[in-house]
Amino acid sequence: MFSDVALPLPDDFGKTPDGIPVKIFTLTNSHGAKLRVMNFGAIVLSIEVPDRNGKSGDIALGYKTLAEYIKDTPYFGAVVGRYGNRIANGKFTLDGTTYTLATNNEPGGIPCALHGGLKGFDKAIWDGVGVEKPGATGVRFDYRSKDGEEGYPGNLDVTVTYWLTNDNEWQIDYAAATDKATPVNITQHSYFNLKGEGNGDILGHELTLNSSRFTPVTAGLIPTGELRPVAGTPFDFTSPHAIGERIDAKDDQIQFGGGYDHNWVLDGKPGELSPAATVYEPTTGRVMEVLTTEPGIQFYAGNFLDGSLTGKQGKPYARRSGLALETQHFPDSPNHPDFPNTILRPGEEFKSTTVYRFSVR
């Protein structure tokens, strides 16, 4: 065992309605940061990091109990897949065969498949085991998505490893292999509030995105195929802007999403770990940087939270009380051959890394 980390051991977190035990793993580092995760949905339950005064706080939205996650959740803290984000009409054609998925989302009254379907990776029971390496402690989750699951072809073997490093980084390593060609787009759907979960909205957070283009959408939040420059639009975060500054602008794209719920095309080189986003919260001084090997990032401002869900502090999560920054390939890519490829074939390996780095200023 390495002297600067502690191998995380699982604790009980109850059972599913089918009687399957669910386990929690707690990762800690030398600076007092803490990450709590469970093997149901590979869900992140809490992220505790200090503010500029050294006071630790939980910045991840979520619930107190397993039952709440099972009953109703907008993907709080979960790994989503087999295909994160949306696929138009729940259909795609691959190698001459058309596949039909569940349409579990209807933005603008237009049906689509969202985040893997009715029972995606967010509702799976993953095999979890504590792991360690110099300067970091982690947990590795493994899951086999069977051929035909949620309508997708091929047996897909997926590994997601969470690391908490002594540099206050939460690193996520994804890997997958298949025995039949299939779309793959796996991401992490944590909602963040750098003031602390349950402590109001995120409109005062200042966001920077390393992106000069985004993918505009239809009223059904499906990309049109265009890569549109952000310059001169409310989507320009190439320099820092408060999230609330332009979130209700009179702009068709803003109105389609009820605010920000779009994919930005990252300016970094896909496949290389590059800066994607920075979020700064002025009252606490907390900073979150996002780095990724992915070509895109979905910035979602929590527009569909409506106060009906109650968080860990017993406070309702009102509209825009959390933000998600989901590193990804572009939505509906199987139906857009000009977008970066999301088809994984036998003999290939899907690999992706995203880092959320926490600091203060």
Image (tube, rainbow, N blue to C red):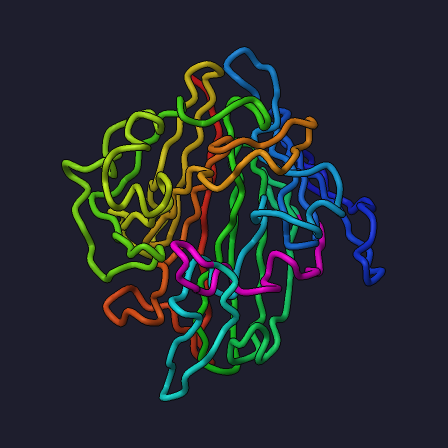
Could one spot residue 49 in this view of the protein? Answer: no
| Rendered-image quadrant of the N terminus | top right
Q: Residue at x 54, y 11 (%)?
A: 53
In the image, farthest residue toward the front: 109
Q: Nearer the viewer, residue 358 or 265?
A: 265
Judge from the rendering whether residue 2 lies leftward or rightward of residue 120; answer left or right: right
- Residue 86 highlighted magenta (yes or no): no
Q: Residue at x 47, y 33 (%)?
A: 320
Q: Looking at the image, is 131 positioned above or below residue 35? A: below
In the image, farthest residue toward the bottom: 96
| Rendered-image quadrant of the C terminus | top left
Numbered circles on residues, count: 0
Q: Residue at x 40, y 69 (%)?
A: 89
Residue 299 pos. (x, y %): 38, 42
Question: What's the magenta region?
Answer: 106-131
Q: Looking at the image, is 1 positioned above or below residue 220? A: above
Judge from the rendering whether residue 305 lies leftward or rightward of residue 130; answer left or right: left
Residue 5 pos. (x, y %): 67, 36
Judge from the rendering whether residue 152 lies leftward or rightward of residue 221; answer left or right: right
Q: Looking at the image, is 286 positioned above or below residue 254? A: above
Q: On the image, which quarter does residue 190 sit in?
A: top right
Residue 64 pos. (x, y %): 73, 36
